[in-house]
Image: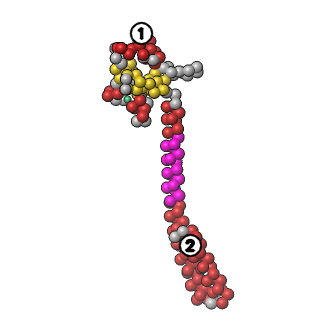
Amino acid sequence: MDIGSALSSINAGIGLARTALDARDDRKAKEAVSEIAHQMADVNLWALGMSEHLRKLEAELRDTAAKLAAAEERERQRGKYVLRPLVPGKFVLAFEPVDGDQAPAHYLCQVCFDAGHTSVLQRSNDGVTFNCLRDRGHRLIVPKALHGLLGEAADASAEERR
Ligand SMILES: [Zn+2]
């Protein structure tokens, strides 16, 4: 039942009641009242169903809004990083602070970030290996020939070890 047919049914019942009252026919009036009560019960069931449907839609809306806010925050975070090939064919997300940034230069694991996790790559003591703490398989080893190409994040990491 939709709202239009529910209202039509009620209006039809009210019309029957008016006709019965105008004719001063108790039997017809009782039938009309019974019909109106029946229609009102149907409308109440319909309204209950719509209320439940509305509650589900509101829950979905809240869930979708939360997902959108998380995606926007993720995109805002992503905007702070530059995709950089640390090793040929293997990338990191590089953060290089500008004036006012409190965070030091660092690299994020690009694989983890794309999967929805933030994992700062940790430079090992050999100075050429960058470890992802979430997944050892994401480790990057920079060939010695490319050490001079390591960015500020790698240099900052090297400074911290001294
Ligand atoms: Zn990772």
Q: Quadrant of residue 111?
A: top left
Question: Which is the main secondary structure of the residues drawn in magenta?
Answer: helix
Q: Is residue 56 left or right of residue 109?
A: right
Please tell me in which quarter of the rendered image ligand 1 is found.
top left
Label ID, residue 40 = none
Indicate yes or no: mark 1 CB to ligand 1 under 8 Å.
Answer: no
Residue 79 drawn at (x, y percent): 52, 30
Residue that sits furthest to the right in the current view: 22
Identify which residue is drawn at 50% across, 39% down.
Answer: 71
- Whether residue 137 is visible to the viewer of this picture, yes or no, is yes
Q: Which residue in the structure is indicated by mark 2?
A: 5
In the rendered image, the vertical position of residue 13 relative to residue 139, given as above or below: below
* SS assignment at label 2: helix
Magenta segment range?
A: 53-69
Mark 1, residue position:
162
Task: Look at the picture and state if 55 lies above or below 31.
Answer: above
In the rendered structure, does residue 107 fall within the stretch colored magenta?
A: no
Q: Residue at x 52, y 28 (%)?
A: 80
Q: Residue at x 36, y 18 (%)?
A: 142
The percent coordinates of residue 16 (x first, y second) are 61, 83
* Mark 1 or 2, nearer chain start: 2
- Ligand 1 under 8 Å from disc 2 Cβ: no
Label 2 environment density (alpha carbons within 10 Å; few <14, some 14–19, many ≥20): few
What crowding class fits label 1: few (fewer than 14 Cα within 10 Å), some (14-19), or many (20 or more)? few
In which image quadrant can residue 162 be found?
Answer: top left
Q: Residue at x 50, y 64 (%)?
A: 49
Residue toward you, 86 or 137: 86
Q: Is residue 28 left or right of residue 161?
A: right
Labelled pair 1, 2 in contact (Cβ < 8 Å): no
Foreground residue among 50 and 106 = 106
Amino acid bearing label 2: Ser
